[in-house]
């Protein structure tokens, strides 16, 4: 365990709650004046700190421009109830992909071709980095965990691989249908290592169409009509190359999925396409 992940809460001042991201606060380092995002977790038990360190040390070690920076954990006693409070320090970001897409849908304002390329490129490179540099997967890729910078130009993934402290189900729509009978979709009990690429393909379709599928949806239902409808709309709006790239990500119903390295050629062809 790296002791550098533990920070002193007395070095920081909590400023205010975040205007957009629920359960997050702004916290400032007294000496450097740098402002971070902060999420506070309360517990009656102190040993939860060891679990937090185990979960977040992996994110703490990541270094990539499209992965939200994680800067450490602070702790103190809440004087109101004597519970332990743990402060998780993140790079400051403005809002998440879920809120952005819902806002765009409300205004009927689709991503421009340049915005779509930015989204696809940022997330692809972050996931490729994890695969290439760490032989690891995100394991938690969903709209709530993709954060966006203040100017709206940079998309970053967050909460990489965090599963052991969670009891919720992972959205079934992001898991290849050929493994549906082999898991109960709980974060703790299942390893999604090989399925980030499929997850990413579904997410691109949702962003391209401003249409989040139900969490239990299967994009291959009804003789693939759902998948074909989403793909057709994506191709019409952003070109065939993005549609072809998505098809490579999805594979054949999740069978024999490609790696991000194997998908890079199709990714690059889409990125250098100048027909907007």
Image (cartoon, rainbow, N blue to C red):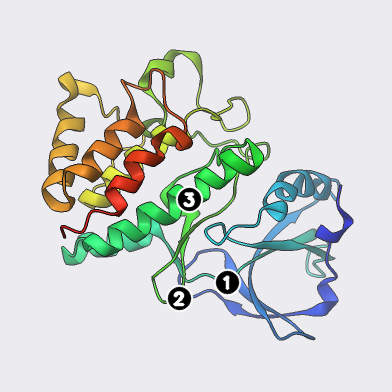
How dense is the environment of label 2, judged by Cα within 10 Å: few (below 14), some, or many (20 and up)?
few
- Which residue is labeled 1 in the image? 92
Choose top left, top right, bottom left or bottom right for residue 72: bottom right
Choose top left, top right, bottom left or bottom right for residue 97: bottom left
Q: CA distance from mark 3 to mark 1?
A: 20 Å
- SS for dot 2: loop
Residue at the (24%, 48%) spot, across then down: 211
Judge left or right: residue 215 versus residue 133: left
Q: Earlier in the sequence, mark 3 or mark 1?
A: 1
Above or below 95: residue 200: above
Question: Which is in the foreground here, disc 2 or disc 3?
Answer: 3
How dense is the environment of label 3, judged by Cα within 10 Å: few (below 14), some, or many (20 and up)?
some
Asked whether the residues under the numbered discs 1 and 2 touch, taking CB atoms below 8 Å apart as contact, a structural biologist would say yes
Residue 216 seen by the camera: no
Judge left or right: residue 65 versus residue 206: right
- Which residue is labeled 2 in the image? 150
Total numbered badges shown on the rendered structure: 3
Asked whether the residues under the numbered discs 3 and 1 touch, taking CB atoms below 8 Å apart as contact, a structural biologist would say no
Q: CA distance from mark 1 to mark 2?
A: 9 Å
**Label placed on residue 125:** 3
């Amino acid at each position: 365990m790296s002791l550098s992940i533990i920070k002193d809460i007395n070095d920081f001042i909590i400023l205010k709650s975040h205007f957009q991201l629920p359960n997050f606060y702004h916290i400032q380092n007294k000496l450097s004046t740098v402002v971070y995002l902060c999420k506070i977790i309360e517990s009656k038990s102190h040993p939860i700190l060891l679990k937090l360190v185990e979960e977040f040390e992996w994110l703490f070690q990541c270094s990539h421009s499209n992965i939200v920076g994680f800067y450490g954990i602070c702790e103190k006693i809440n004087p109101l109830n004597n519970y332990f409070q743990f402060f998780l320090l993140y790079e400051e970001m403005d809002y998440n992909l879920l809120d952005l897409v819902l806002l765009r849908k409300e205004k009927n304002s689709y991503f421009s071709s340049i915005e779509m390329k930015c989204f696809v490129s940022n997330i692809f490179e972050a996931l490729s980095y994890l695969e290439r540099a760490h032989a690891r997967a995100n394991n938690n890729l969903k709209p709530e965990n993709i954060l966006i910078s203040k100017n709206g130009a940079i998309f970053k993934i967050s909460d990489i691989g965090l599963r052991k402290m969670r009891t919720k189900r992972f959205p079934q729509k992001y898991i290849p249908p050929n493994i549906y009978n082999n898991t109960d979709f709980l974060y703790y009990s299942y390893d999604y290592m090989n399925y980030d690429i499929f997850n990413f393909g579904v997410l691109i379709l949702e962003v391209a169409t401003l249409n989040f599928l139900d969490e239990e949806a299967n994009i291959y239902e009804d003789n693939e009509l759902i998948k074909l409808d989403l793909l057709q709309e994506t191709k019409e709006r952003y070109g065939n190359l993005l549609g072809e790239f998505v098809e490579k990500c999805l594979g054949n119903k999740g069978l024999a999925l490609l790696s991000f390295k194997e998908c890079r050629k199709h990714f690059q062809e889409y990125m250098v396409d100048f027909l907007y």
